[in-house]
Amino acid sequence: MRRTSALLVGLAMVASLTACSSSTSDASCTPLAESGSTVDKVKVSGGFGELPTAAFPTPLTVTKTERKILVKGDGAPALPGGAVTLDFSIYNGETGEILGQTKYDGTDLQTSSLDDNSLIHGLVATIQCANAGSQIVSVIAPTDLLDQNGAPVGNLGKNTSLVVVADLISTSLAKANGKDQPAQDGFPTVVLDANGVPGVTVPKTKAPTELKVEVLKKGDGPIVKAGSSVTVHYTGVLWSDGTVFDSSWSRKSPATFSLNGVVPGFAQALEGQTVGSQIVAVIPPELGYGNQDNGTIPSGSTLVFVIDILGTTP
């Protein structure tokens, strides 16, 4: 049985996010791990996009993390502070036991920011500077498997290395980086903190009865198409009182999903926008959750989303 263990979650999310700026060129990207004789001992069957199997002699350990690009992709590089979406398999280097594995069918992709506040350092070293579309194998040293308290993740022994096989599905921006646009009358006011996290103030006026979209930053990246997959950071508030009901920022990771799987107003607001843009979408109940409660969202609510468009795939 394929498992997504607590260790997998621990590797992917160990602390609060401190987003940093993401370069748009790989010229300034410095890899944190190199190939070596230990990672060369790991034999991987299954190419990019396929459920892999890794075989290696045990115990396998390193004092410095090593990584090897098995399949080099031609997509954008994974840059510090940007978002990455992955499939990956994790093995105990001491025993060869598989500890966690995504399904490799697109249903449980792992999305995170590429920094030491969101990922264990060994995964950052595994991924950084690799191109989207790459398959990577690494042997992560025990010193790169510590949480922020200095303890090994997932009850690993202090001398245990991990073997990771990762498919880098996509790379994205850390936050919207487009050109600022003039504000439109009648829209909520958005103020960003130093990390790009939005604060939203809703006007004390009657809510619009149709979908309204304001572009705060205009990016120059690819266009979001109907039904495509997107990676976004977003905050959602109620028009009625400005209460935050959902935020990817508070979960410390961008969200990746298909536009076919969200409320119609959210999808319609994103379609035709460009990566790098930040928009405000005011969604009437008919294009949101209608006349039914949804968690903390009362029936008949007009929703306001501030959305950073970080990446898109067909």
Image: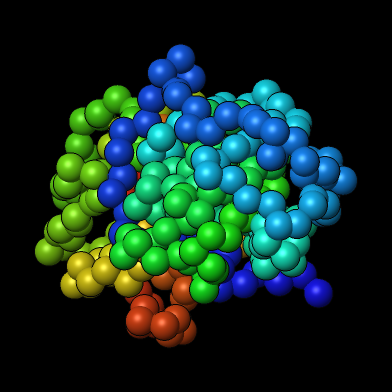
Determine the residue located farthest toward the top in the rendered image.
Answer: 27
Residue 138 seen in this snapshot: yes
Name the residue: 53% across, 49% down. Answer: 141
Quadrant of the rendering where the C terminus is positioned = top right
Q: Position of residue 188 (x, y in %)?
A: 20, 53
Colouring chosen for the image of the structure: rainbow
Residue 305 seen in this snapshot: no
Q: Is residue 16 above or below residue 72?
A: below
Name the residue: 39% across, 66% down. Answer: 151
Quadrant of the rendering where the N terminus is positioned = bottom right
Q: Is residue 300 above or below residue 126?
A: below
Name the residue: 19% across, 72% down. Answer: 241
Whether residue 109 sits left or right of residue 2 in the image: it is left
Numbered disc total: 0
Name the residue: 75% across, 31% down. Answer: 71
Q: Position of residue 51 (x, y in %)?
A: 82, 54
Q: Position of residue 292 (x, y in %)?
A: 46, 84
Q: Position of residue 307 (x, y in %)?
A: 37, 49
- Pick the residue in front: 214 or 95: 95
Determine the residue located farthest toward the right in the rendered image.
Answer: 45
Whether residue 226 sits left or right of residue 211 in the image: it is right
| Residue 167 falls in image quadrant | top right
